[in-house]
Image (cartoon, rainbow, N blue to C red):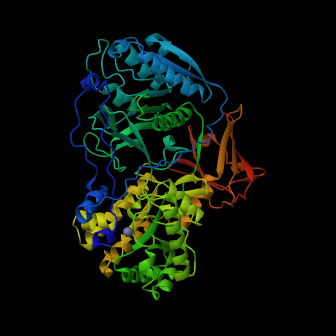
Amino acid sequence: MSPRERRPTGYPYEPPRPRTPWAWGGAILLLGTLVAGLIGAATILWRYIDVDAVLQAATGEMPAPVTEMVADVPLAELTNTVSWMAHLYVPEHNAGFFPDPRYHSDLNERWGALLVGIGAGIHHVHGAAALDSLAGDGLLVVAAAVCLDDDERDAIRRHVDRGGHLIATWALGARDAECEWDGYRLLKDVTDADAAGTLEGLPPTYLTVPYGAVFSAGLPPGLRVELKTEPWITVLSGSSGVFWTDWALNPLSAPGGGAAGAAIARTTKSGARIVWFGWRMDVAATERDRRLLERVAQNSALWASGHIVVDVSPWPDGRRSAMSVTQDAEHSFRNSRRLAERFSTMDVPVTFFVVTQLAAEYPELADVLSAAGEVATHSVDHRQVAGRLWSGQLAGLRQARIDVQGWAGVAPVGFRPPREVFDEYTLEAWRRSGGRYLAGSNYARTAAPEIFDTPAGPLVVLPRVVDDDYAVMVTRGETSPDSLRATFLGSLEKVRWLGGLDLLTVHTQLIDSYSRVDAVESAVRAAQAAGDVWIAQASDVADWWLQRSGLELQVRERVDRSAVLTISNRGDEEVGSAWLQVFLPDERETYAAPELGEQIVDSEYGPGGLRVRLPVLAPGESIEILLPRRAA
Ligand SMILES: [Zn+2]
């Protein structure tokens, strides 16, 4: 084994190749001025390195190529509502803007289908006068209405001033009746954004949906969606709930600085609920992206039309995010003692992924690492597992498991594959060997764990969407403990923003001094001080994610618009510590306290709405919580 092969993994993946800009890019480039300086905040940049190139240079051989495996995103059933009305606006002057004259009506049809799926009846509205005669409680949808005359603009403003609800998308009224450029005044007025601008289309184009706003309900926290590339619209606003980001889930810059908002949900003083998207609904890059994008739209449309939207909070006890401290114990294996002893005194668990051939040389460390938390495996010999034959993978993983059991006395349930890559065989072989989770790359698809269904059963993948010590000290060459500390603190903030998992990762050959252990400790202290971070060993995070995935949520609306939430535990294990997050369309006074049978359920109001504590749910158990609406 050359030293290169034993070196820790950084983030060995290239973002996907840029896609060809969409055919309409040219026409839409004329939309407005371009925003310069699309840079993520320096403190939260998540860099990656091309390990393949490094390896090839060192050894003259390439590891087997591995293709990205994508986990399903199961989507919960949407709220079953009593029927309601959506008004789809047909702009007077818009059709000529698009090369295909049917384009806009196709887009409205797409919206119609989305809305029918959540209980809406559809009504088409033509012209400003018709806007003025809309009934107060319907939802007005103005999709991709780029060219609007003065009467139409005024009518939209009046609708909002009356407390009428609105979904608008893309470059709302950025052009006039002749489709001449006019700017983002109407868009800014309606969204109350501090700034709005055009985001130059640098392919590929990504949106990220952090946990916590209505858009994210039922979706994995920190979900990334790819769009076709063209200049999209961005805003700077505190009401943003979806953001334009890079591949690694770091926000791009809005005009004038700050995170580039891609979607807004807000309530005006007049009581109007306003939703805006910076894209059109027909621009998802793949079928998977389309499905996820439509769920984002349906969540917000439910809310804008006055229905509650409910989600199971991602982490136990309703916490915002999770953190696991992990170390790959490989080269310089004995350095693992420092981290283990420090964290044992702090009573914070650490997960050690040990290379079992190396562990065998240090039997005295088995108890030290076990006492600090969890001993998992990083393979027998640190050679890439993915890409090998089934029999070879299975034999290797079984051996790693037997080795750890012999060394530490407990069979490991976690595996970090060398280079963080895995394939179908890796997942199944580890599950068959008795493993429950794998710490590996999810190519930044989400900031949360994913569940893969293998023929041997489900396996959780814990992704790392933050820099490890290798990225800081080797790739960036910043070897001071302060750099390490700053990166870990930045990563914590990034993951708290996303509502995901901070898989803090260090390596024995780099954490070779107490000052570097201090840097890890400061990140954990910061997470403790934040108060909303669940700090747990990796196996507990994986087990929680699997338990939570067993919870099935259905929301049904009564005629009086009270909501009945049915929560069923379809999994094999008891689920405790789960909370619901309820996004409320109306002021809290509108709702009475949630009831479970005769009892009032523990609940509290917070920034995102109402949080409801669930009782412990046994496997197969089902409960109904009523959220009553007070009579007006
Ligand atoms: Zn390694």
Residue 482 figure quarter: bottom left
Q: Is residue 390 above or below residue 593?
A: below
Q: Position of residue 66 (x, y in %)?
A: 40, 53
Residue 336 figure quarter: bottom left
Is residue 313 shown to the viewer in this render? no
Q: Is residue 360 above or below residue 17?
A: below
The residue positioned farthest toward the bottom in the image shown: 364
Q: Is residue 541 above or below residue 262?
A: below
- Residue closest to the eye, 621 or 382: 382
Q: Position of residue 82 (x, y in %)?
A: 67, 29
- Residue closest to the eye, 26 or 603: 26
The residue positioned farthest toward the right in the image shown: 598
Which quadrant does the C terminus fall into? top right
Q: Position of residue 375 (x, y in %)?
A: 50, 75
Is residue 374 shown to the viewer in this render? yes
In the picture, measured across the screen, residue 449 lies left or right of residue 244, that is right
Q: Position of residue 282 (x, y in %)?
A: 43, 27
Which quadrant does the N terminus fall into? bottom left
In the picture, measured across the screen, residue 628 lies left or right of residue 581, that is right
- Residue closest to the eye, 270 or 582: 582
In the image, what residue occupies the spot 68% across and 37% down?
556
Residue 428 figure quarter: bottom right
Ligand 1 is found in which quarter of the picture? Answer: bottom left
- Residue closest to the eye, 589 or 261: 261
Q: Is residue 493 above or below residue 113?
A: below
In the image, what residue occupies the spot 37% across and 28% down?
170
- How many discs mark residues in the rendered view? 0
In the picture, measured across the screen, residue 550 lies left or right of residue 531, that is right
